[in-house]
Image (cartoon, rainbow, N blue to C red):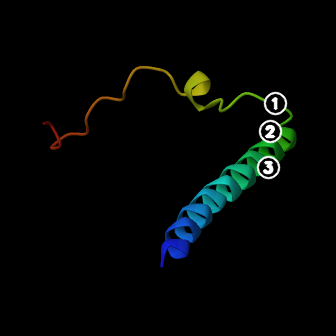
Amino acid sequence: MPDNDYLIIILAVATLAIVIVVAGFLRRRVAQAKGDPRRSSFTEHHGGPPRPNRPGTDH
């Protein structure tokens, strides 16, 4: 049974490595498609003050 303990650890580490590699690959693909290596432009274009509450939804 000790072999199974190592097998579980090896599979967990391998799964984590595969996820990191795939995430990096997809992130590079999106950056190339955008033509911009920055993470996101959301905060640059949507960083204004918050909108006022609608009538009847005051907190």
Residue 33: where, in percent of width, then height? 85, 44
Please name whichever residue, 50 or 4, is drawn nearer the observer in this view of the structure.
4
- The answer to the question of whether label 2 and label 1 lie on touching residues, with beta carbons closer than 8 A, is yes
Regarding mark 1 in the picture, which secondary structure is present there?
Answer: loop
Residue drawn 67% across and 32% down?
A: 39
Horizontal arrangement in the rendering, residue 31 relative to residue 6 (left or right): right
Q: CA distance from mark 2 to mark 1?
A: 5 Å
| Quadrant location, the C terminus | top left
The amino acid beneath tag 2 is Ala
Q: Name the image quarter holding residue 13.
A: bottom right
Mark 3 or 2, closer to the camera: 3
Regarding mark 2 in the picture, which secondary structure is present there?
Answer: helix
* Residue, disc 2: 31
* Residue, disc 3: 25
* Residue, disc 1: 36
Residue 12: where, in percent of width, then height? 56, 62
